Amino acid sequence: MKQLTPKKFIEAASPETLRILYVDGLWQVRSKDVVLLNHDGSIGHSKLETVLSLLAGFGIRRCDVEWDGLPSTAFDAAPKDWRNS
């Protein structure tokens, strides 16, 4: 996976393959075989909102989000009336 600066990432990214992924406890932005490199050299963010704001700054308002790896809540723990709202 190539780590690219924001400008290079946007040039290389494809709208069809742009993804926000939850990897090792952090949110990453990927497209095909490239991942967005932050200014500090890291490739992840602790908050999804930070990633969404960053993408909005590039003019990107929509992409797939995959959160496999987040701890799940048991179905029985959900409020009883959540399906009716």
Image: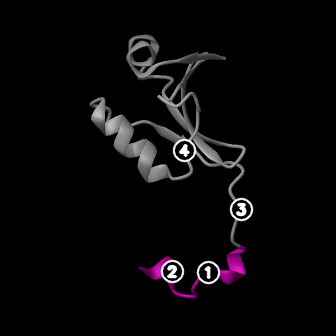
Mark toward the viewer: 1 or 3: 3
Q: On the image, numbered disc 3 is attached to which residue?
A: 71
Q: On the image, numbered disc 2 is attached to which residue?
A: 82
Dot 3 or dot 2, earlier in sequence: 3
**Disc 2 and disc 1 in contact, CB within 8 angstroms:** yes
Dot 1 or dot 3, earlier in sequence: 3
Q: On the image, numbered disc 1 is attached to which residue?
A: 78
Q: Position of residue 36 (x, y in %)?
A: 51, 26
Q: Position of residue 43 (x, y in %)?
A: 58, 32
**Quick check: 53 above or below 30?**
below
Tell me, yes or no, whether the highlighted magenta stretch contains residue 42.
Answer: no
In the rendered view, how is the structure colored?
one colour
Name which quarter of the figure residue 80 lies in: bottom right
Dot 4 or dot 2, earlier in sequence: 4
**Disc 4 and disc 1 in contact, CB within 8 angstroms:** no
Secondary element type, mark 1: loop
**Distance Cα–Cα, label 3 vs label 4:** 17 Å
Left or right of 3, for residue 16: left
**Disc 1 and disc 3 in contact, CB within 8 angstroms:** no
Secondary element type, mark 2: helix
Q: Specify the segment rendered in magenta.
A: 74-85
Q: On the image, numbered disc 4 is attached to which residue?
A: 45
Amino acid found under the numbered disc labelled 1: Ala
Amino acid found under the numbered disc labelled 3: Pro
**Distance Cα–Cα, label 2 vs label 1:** 7 Å
**Quick check: 10 above or below 82?**
above
Tell me, yes or no, whether the highlighted magenta stretch contains residue 78.
Answer: yes
Left or right of 60, for residue 2: right
Mark toward the viewer: 4 or 1: 4
Secondary element type, mark 4: loop
Q: Nearer the viewer, residue 69 or 58?
A: 58
